[in-house]
Amino acid sequence: MHIRRLTPLLLAGCLVLAGCGGGAGSGVGGGAADPNATVSVRLLLEPTSLDITKVAGAALEQVLLDNVYQTLLTRSADQKIVPLLAASYETSPDGLTYTFRLHPDARFADGSPLTSADVAASLDRARAADSTNPNAKDLAAVTSVATPDPRTVVITLGQRDTNLTYALTNRAGAVLKKGTDPATLDATPNGSGPFVVRQWRRGSAIVLARNDNYWGEKAKVASVVLNYIPDFNAANNAQLTGETDVETAPLPTLLDPIRADPDFTITQGITSDKYVLGINNTKGPLADVRVRQAIRRAIDKDGLSKILGGTYKRIGSGVAPTDPWFQDLTSIDPYDPASAKDLLARAGFPNGLNLTLTVPNIYPTTIGDYIVSQLKQVGIAVTFQPVEFASWLDKVYKRGDFDLSIVDHAEARDIGNYANPRYYWHYNSPVVQDLYRRATTAATEGERDDLLKQAARQISLDAASDWLLNPTDLVVLRPGITGFPTSGTSSRLNLSQLAATSKE
């Protein structure tokens, strides 16, 4: 599961989700970049572990992918799939064989060479029957990983998989050194990226340092301090006082002091984030599609966007505008309180019903309070239950013990979650499962996209969830900061081009 971030409000952090961003400079402040600079960045959600092979959460991918661990392929700022550890690759005409040629200079941070044996061991571990990798299903079509020589990797599939190259850009494709002791991964990752983890001050910050053994272009700064500041006012103050150089995920309604200071630049990028009102499709009255549709029609998403600062848009489905199969489905179950009441009555609840909304306490309460208020107006009494994020992972995500929940699913192209009846929503549609299966084995990307558009429409018609908003990615930069990603920063934060001038 890939969920994360709350940009202005939701966050989620965790489960799974993605998207690299383009770099930007403040446009203010002269002087040459300082290769010895340390850049301080405010982030929202701290990972619970650094073991990328086991622990779910976009917060972990945000820090480690591209920076510490690398993959055969990665994603560019505009979401194109491009080679990384692979210098090149080719696909057989039948789509069942992928051959990758590794960069000859690739090596790990400890100086040892990165070879095809390391790639094969990593992929085989990720796809093993006993794999703990949250993205193990992304490699389900793989039948073998061969290493004809130290620089060649051949991946063979049992059936065509139009999502394989994208999957290889995610954590399932992260390359670890063969023989790595899993017990060491929680705190001491050894990857091949431009940074290493120098220190983890739990509850406070993760410090990345330049990898002097990096096989490619060296990082442009000596270190990056990733400060975890969940309070939005505190984050703003840290940026205004110079404690941080970059503030990600600011709350739009609190930005006036920063807007008033001409030294700061506020960038706006795109995200793959979907703020999801998760609905337990198997829980009591929620198993009735009419109840789920009533919930959707009871919530005014434009009103929610307004109270959050207006930098959000409605999408009407679990597909973000960054995905190739996006379509505007906001006409399905639009805001209509009268219709919501009628649906509840026809479902056997003319006097309303009682539900519980379980939300990680990493979110500001504004969104939860708004949802409670909106549902109350159609007769649904909601008990708002904030919980620690670790408790949310156990209670909601793992055990499915909930009625409603709110989380930000940050990862792109994650529509497959709705084809998995074991996912925490417990949405079980044979129609969607068939469409998704056919899409992944489609002969062309165009055919795949058409099938997934059909799946997204069916998911929305079934009111499997409600999709509150898709946020704009806001980043605040001090003068002299360049190369910092400005899109999809909640789930992917490639810092390889980050540079900074000295503070005056």
Image (spheres, rainbow, N blue to C red):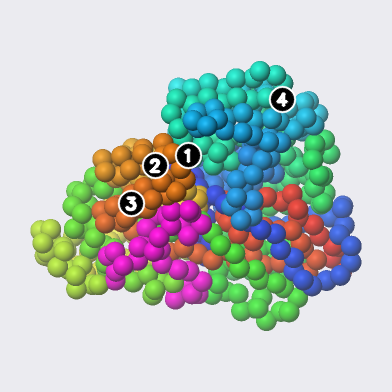
Q: Nearer the viewer, residue 504 or 69?
A: 69
Horizontal side of residue 78 vs 93, given as left or right: right
> How far across and how far down the image is residue 278, in percent?
35, 53
Per the model, the C-alpha gap separating discs 3 and 4 is 41 Å
Per the model, the C-alpha gap separating discs 2 and 1 is 7 Å
Looking at the rendered structure, which numbered label has been put on residue 162? 1
139 drawn magenta: no
Upstream in the sequence, badge 2 or badge 1? 1
Looking at the rendered structure, which numbered label has been put on residue 439? 2
Horizontal side of residue 353 vs 328, given as left or right: left
**Residue located at (84% from left, 65% from top):** 503
Per the model, the C-alpha gap separating discs 4 and 1 is 25 Å
Per the model, the C-alpha gap separating discs 2 and 4 is 32 Å
Q: Quadrant of residue 37?
A: bottom right
327 drawn magenta: yes
> How far across and how far down the image is residue 326, in percent?
43, 57
